[in-house]
């Protein structure tokens, strides 16, 4: 995903450098690829407002919409509200798209109560309005009302459980509140959504290590291993693997003092973990070879293996 | 017949059956001026008229997404991910815990969802009785909504009928053009509709057939002219996306089938219980280390795991490499 957004940004750079390209093409490119370039939008879009007689109304309105959002992104509330008022003169006050922009305007002007009023009204007309639900959550987040925000997001997920970005958001919220078990649940959900994503496996592994306990260390190393299978050079997963193995071995050493608990540790499994750790350490040292960090990494890893 | 070879005309292709070869017919140039070109122009104009008429008649009704349908569909998407291949990327215990979480007889999520659907339907019904107003969420399909797509179709049909009748009336019996390629007799139905001449070469096109050829041939042309560079369609799609976020859908009109939430939820429980997912995650660590632990994997936990003997021994792999 990162690479695709990079390439669309590069394309945008080429478009802006080429002076023969019409501003419409640039604006279209930005909105097609959902790039966050408010200053570019304003630079190329504002002069087009004077040409409104030359384009169909629908096109002009979508231009205004893009401009309004860009203006609000660049904290120019004055300009934003001007444009929104102009939109109103075309669509009337009942249009949903207009009211959505109006609420955004109110939000950025700091008039949150009125914005919430609009969202509530939208929701009472149509409870399936996910946009309003998301905005309400975002408002709570910005007000640092963590618990309410979490409840709000929870309600949202109950209605829209298949929305993966919402699960990411939920995991973030959980982590901020120190609820790693909850966050792990969210990330398991994300593994189901996108099982080949290395960063998801990595994060899930890290969460398991953070939660701690034998079972979780085992799960963690499996996810790190899975991540390394997809991407052999993933440094983050290698470090994760070493730390999961290390925690596992530490725990084992602690518990093998106790005779009762000693039986629970399978020797083959312990052997496997030792091998995994050796594998991780070896690969890490190999991948840092030649860089300035090499010495540091070696010291850390040798400390860890002691 | 076969002895009467036309002496003046160029030898026709050998692909053409003998009997169908006839002499070249000279078509009057006023047929071109007064029949072929006018027909083409009439068709183009009629096509444009039809397009703009359909725009006027189109009922672009924006409808609220029904709450129950949206929520249940979303839940089903989420639960079905578990029985897709993705389920193998959770460890076995977590996977099974999740299956329980969805399908448990009393506290399963899907069971709770079924209860919720029931309550919600009841609540909505009560609300309707109280308000006695319509929220556009009726069980009965709106009769006017059924008219929407019908109107467009009627216009299309009527126009077609009138045009065909008119063309049959004014231009019947003409041979309008000749296709520059020889054709077999099989094309007679397509090219010479309305002409009952067995001996006429198939390359000649009658007026009614010309009408059909132009009608279908112009589709691509209209696409080019009306939709331009696809901007209109793009705008429609964008609008649909924005409306979808706002919880609306563009209904295509027509009576819509009622979404039977409970049936789908029950089906999902069953398919989750039946689901069989091959676990990939649980031996990821041994796979990573390779050779030393590969014997453990070979065990194969399912019958038929190793039909082709590929995982039999590590020596087998070496052989393949050396080849």
Image (cartoon, coloured by chain):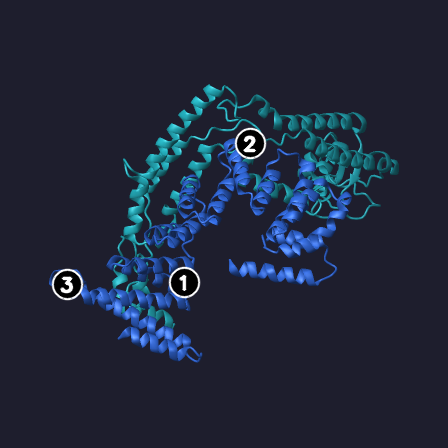
Residue A23, located in which quarter of the rendered image? bottom right
Query: Residues under labels 1 and 3: Cα distance?
Result: 35 Å
- Letter of the chain that mark 3 sits on in the rendering: A
Residue A291: percent from left, percent from top: 44, 78
Residue B161: percent from left, percent from top: 71, 26
In the rendered picture, chain B carries what hue? cyan
Classify mark 2: residues with Cα within 10 Å, few (<14), some (14-19) or many (20+).
some
Of tags 2 and 1, the one toward the viewer is 2
Marks 1 and 3 on same chain: yes
Give SS at disc 1. Answer: helix
The reply to whether residue B12 is visible in this rendering is no
Residue sitting nearer the eye, A2 or B148: A2
Residue with the most extreme left position: A259
Residue sitting nearer the eye, A198 or A206: A206
Residue sitting nearer the eye, B76 or B28: B76
Above or below for B224 versus B52: below
Marks counted in the figure total 3
Above or below for A172 versus B100: below
In the rendered picture, chain A carries what hue? blue
Classify mark 3: residues with Cα within 10 Å, few (<14), some (14-19) or many (20+).
some
Residue highlighted by disc 1:
A230
Residue highlighted by disc 3:
A262
Q: Are marks 2 and 3 in contact (CB under 8 Å)?
A: no
Above or below for A280 versus B105: below
Query: Residues under labels 2 and 1: Cα distance?
Result: 44 Å
């Amino acid at each position: 995903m990162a690479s695709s957004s990079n390439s669309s940004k590069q394309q945008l750079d080429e478009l802006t450098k080429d002076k023969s390209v019409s501003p419409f093409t640039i604006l279209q490119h930005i909105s097609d690829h959902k790039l966050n370039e408010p200053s570019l939008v304003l630079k190329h879009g504002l002069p087009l407002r004077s040409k409104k007689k030359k384009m169909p109304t629908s096109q002009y309105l979508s231009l205004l919409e893009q401009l309004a959002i860009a203006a609000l992104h660049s904290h120019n509330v004055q300009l934003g509200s001007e444009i929104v008022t102009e939109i109103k003169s075309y669509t009337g006050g009942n249009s949903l798209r207009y009211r959505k922009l109006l609420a955004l305007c109110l939000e950025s002007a700091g008039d949150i109560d009125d914005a919430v009023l609009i969202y509530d009204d939208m929701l009472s007309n149509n409870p399936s309005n996910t946009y309003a639900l998301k905005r309400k959550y975002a408002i709570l987040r910005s007000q640092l009302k963590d618990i309410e925000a979490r409840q709000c997001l929870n309600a949202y997920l109950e209605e829209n459980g298949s929305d993966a970005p919402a699960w990411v958001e939920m995991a973030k919220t959980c982590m901020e509140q120190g609820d790693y078990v909850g966050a792990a649940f969210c990330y398991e959900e994300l593994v189901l959504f996108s099982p080949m994503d290395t960063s998801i496996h990595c994060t899930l592994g890290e969460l398991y290590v953070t939660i701690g306990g034998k079972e979780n260390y085992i799960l963690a190393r499996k996810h790190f291993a899975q991540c390394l299978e997809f991407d052999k050079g993933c440094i983050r997963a290698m470090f994760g693997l070493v730390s999961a193995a290390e925690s596992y071995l530490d725990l084992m050493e602690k518990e093998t003092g106790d005779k009762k608990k000693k039986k629970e540790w399978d020797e083959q499994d312990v052997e496997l973990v030792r091998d995994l750790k050796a594998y991780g350490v070896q690969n890490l040292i190999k991948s840092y070879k030649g860089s300035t960090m090499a010495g540091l990494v070696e010291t850390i890893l040798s400390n860890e293996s002691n | 017949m076969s002895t009467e070879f036309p002496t003046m005309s160029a030898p026709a292709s050998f692909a053409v059956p003998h009997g169908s070869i006839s002499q070249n017919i000279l078509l009057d140039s006023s047929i071109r001026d007064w029949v072929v070109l006018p027909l083409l122009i009439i068709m183009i104009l009629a096509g444009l008229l039809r397009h703009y008429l359909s725009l006027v008649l189109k009922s672009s009704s924006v409808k609220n997404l029904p709450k129950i349908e949206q929520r249940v569909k979303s839940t089903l998407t989420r639960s079905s991910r578990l029985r897709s291949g993705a389920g193998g990327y959770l460890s076995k215990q977590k996977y099974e815990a999740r299956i329980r979480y969805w399908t448990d007889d009393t506290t399963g999520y899907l069971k709770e969802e079924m209860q919720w659907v029931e309550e919600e339907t009841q609540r909505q019904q009560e609300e309707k009785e109280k308000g006695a107003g319509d929220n556009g969420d009726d069980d009965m399909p709106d009769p006017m909504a059924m008219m929407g797509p019908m109107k467009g179709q009627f216009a299309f049909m009527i126009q077609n009928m009138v045009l065909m009748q008119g063309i049959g009336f004014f231009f019947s019996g003409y041979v309008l053009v000749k296709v520059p390629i020889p054709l077999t007799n099989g094309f007679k139905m397509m090219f010479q509709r309305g002409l009952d001449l067995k001996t006429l070469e198939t390359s000649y096109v009658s007026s009614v057939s010309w009408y059909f050829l132009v009608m279908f041939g112009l589709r691509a042309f209209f696409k080019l002219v009306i939709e331009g560079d696809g901007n209109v369609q793009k705008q429609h799609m964008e609008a649909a996306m924005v409306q979808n976020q706002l919880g609306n859908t563009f209904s295509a009109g027509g009576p819509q089938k009622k979404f039977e939430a409970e049936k789908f939820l029950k089906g999902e429980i069953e398919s989750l219980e039946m689901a069989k997912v091959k676990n990939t995650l649980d031996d990821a660590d041994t796979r990573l280390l390779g050779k030393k632990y590969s014997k453990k994997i070979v065990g194969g936990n399912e019958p038929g795991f190793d039909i082709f003997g590929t995982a039999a021994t590590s020596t087998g792999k070496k052989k393949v490499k050396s080849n």
